[in-house]
Amino acid sequence: MLELEGISKNYHGIQVLKNVSLEIKSGEFFTILGPTGAGKTTLLRIIAGLEKPDKGKVYLNGEDITHLPPVKRKVSLVFQTFALYPTMTVYENIALPLKNLGFPEDEIKRRVKDVTELLGISHLLNRSVLEISGGEAQRTAFARALAKDFSILLLDEPLTNVDYKIRERMVVEMKKMYRTLLERGRESIWIFATPDSRETLALSTHVAILYKGEILQCGPILDVYKNPKNIIVASYTSYPWINRINAKVNVQGSECYLSIDDEVIIDASSQREFLKNYNECIVGIRPASIRLYDEASQRGILMKGLCELIEICGSDTLLHFKVGNQRVIALLRQRVPFEFEGKEMRLCVEPTEVFIFSSDGKLITKLSER
């Protein structure tokens, strides 16, 4: 187990990390999700021993390693930049850390063979790293990290500098690597830093949302996704970002309604006790939760809106429309013809997919539960 206890860090008077505390267990694929400048890299560098916290402690299996140098920590890193030596071959790049640690040549060859076969780059061993593609360079960087003995693998936005097709493949490969090593009995902690919610949802078992140096929420990925504590967490676990729709709260006796520019009226009577002290709220709806209204079943909350723009994303469609004066995005798992642009459309969302936030972004309640 890795424990971070009250980690704080300042650079030139700017607080980069504020009292960060986490527990990460062996076997977890743990993601630190947050925007650029949130403090993700600084936190990874403190775990690696490349930086010292101003306050707080780092424990590994109960041992205080806060001031232990990097060489004495069983930590392996993959950086945002590949950090490969251009004058060396793929084999030499992977083998170099093992040579520096004093491993015998036979053991080095065995380890390099194992990891390059796992990553499908064994045919590249004799090539210069200047002769390989970006995806192959990223796999070489992964191989170099995996060849070492490690208790913790730190992945600092390792997919940022490859194109989106390679990124999609590498997400699959990372998941395979993680599972394969677990199956081989090499339990370890994987900590992945990224600003990308899609990578997070695809890879993680657990997640911490880091925002302006603070942990906003932490836990199993599906728990955080289904039960965000505030609108920032809901946004960073949604692709595209969650729709933030301003609404008025109208309580009449035992009934409660949410009004969106008088265009959409949502019955929220089941949540009256949570909403009775509010005049306004923010209705949060993930784009993927919106679908075309089905006249036959007439299920869900009906939303009529003017279609402003249609984006075709492969077999999916991003639909930009207006409800009253507010813009809403829907991610539809189907093609929508461009002819709908400029026309009114009927869309809907299940009540169970609707979050209600206060004006300052704190979760008040969900509209309903199953």
Image: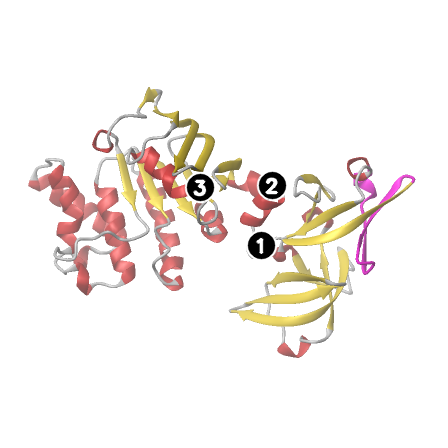
Name the amino acid, label 2. Pro
| Front position in the image: 314 or 259 | 259
Indicate how the structure is coloured in the image.
secondary structure
Q: Which mark is residue 325?
A: none
Distance, label 1 to label 3, CA atoms, is 18 Å
Q: Residues within 10 Å of mark 2 (few under 14, many from 20)?
A: many
Say whether residue 268 is magenta. Answer: yes
Residue 121 % position (x, y): 22, 56
Position above or below: 121 against 72: below
| Front position in the image: 300 or 358 | 358
- Location of residue 297 (image quadrant): bottom right
User: Which comes before the other along the chain, label 1 or label 2?
Assistant: 2
Q: Is 192 left, or right, of 65 in this rendering? A: right
Q: Is 62 left, or right, of 113 in this rendering? A: right
Q: Which mark is residue 241?
A: 1
Residue in the picture at 18% in, 62% down: 130
- Name the secondary structure under disc 2: loop
Q: Residues within 10 Å of mark 3 (few under 14, many from 20)?
A: many
Q: Residues within 10 Å of mark 1 (few under 14, many from 20)?
A: some
Q: Which mark is residue 228?
A: 2
User: Which comes before the other along the chain, label 2 or label 3?
Assistant: 3
Residue 298 % position (x, y): 78, 60
Q: Which residue is mark 3?
A: 32
Determine whether label 1 and label 2 are within 8 Å by CB. no
Name the amino acid, label 1. Trp
Residue 70 % position (x, y): 24, 33
Distance, label 2 to label 3, CA atoms, is 15 Å
Name the amino acid, label 3. Ile
